[in-house]
Image: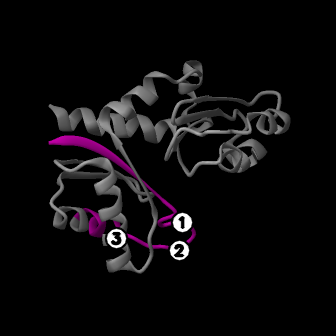
Amino acid sequence: MSTYITLLRGINVGGHNKLPMKELVGLLEDLGFHNVKTYIQTGNIVFKSGKNAAELAESIKTEIEQNHGFAPHVLVLKLDEFKKAMASNPFAEAESEPKTLHLYFLDAEPKNPDLESLENIKKDNERFMLKGKTFYLHTPEGVGRSKLAARAEKALGVAATARNWRTVDKIRVITEEMEH
């Protein structure tokens, strides 16, 4: 059995696509996943399964659609992929302000990312870096005020699911508790 991190996008936001975490845990347990844990209401899930990541993403999406009438974007990461993304953070000094540091987990490595357009719109104090399937963004004034944050996914040309460092670190803690 492998440990997986699943990030759902677009659930429980602004009263749309409501999916209580207790119900989500039940759905995933019905699919045969083990040790299902969630963190906050935005769809951060850790669990164990013997299936591969692609199978997992599709079955989770289908199960939610059948039971709740909407199909969220589902990104499934192996534990080692998640840990590598954390360890590769180029802005380690920003970890002390976890709401200003975001990791965009990408569905695939971008083939032709338009990083120049992001460079042209970023504020002087904003920083970003693309490493493989992870886009790192540091926005000291907050992600909500950042044009760069708003346009990152389009410029990358790949579906992305972003989490701030606080959430990423909490997911790490959950995985460590699960492993012991």
Q: In the rendered image of this protein, does residue 31 appear above or below residue 113?
A: below
- Expressed as whole percent of the image width and height from the top left, the position of residue 56 reads 29, 56
**Residue 100 position in % (x across, y down):** 62, 35
The label nearer to you, 2 versus 3, is 3
Name the residue type under label 2: His
Range of the magenta residues? Answer: 1-25
Quickly name the residue at label 3.
Answer: 62
Q: Quadrant of the N terminus?
A: top left
Q: Are marks 1 and 2 in contact (CB under 8 Å)?
A: yes
Q: CA distance from mark 1 to mark 2?
A: 6 Å
Instruction: Write down the residue under mark 1.
Output: 13
**Looking at the picture, does residue 38 appear above or below residue 58?**
above
For mark 2, give the secondary structure: loop
Q: Quadrant of the C terminus?
A: top left
Which residue corresponds to mark 2?
Answer: 16
The colour scheme used here is one colour
Left or right: where 178 falls relative to 133: left
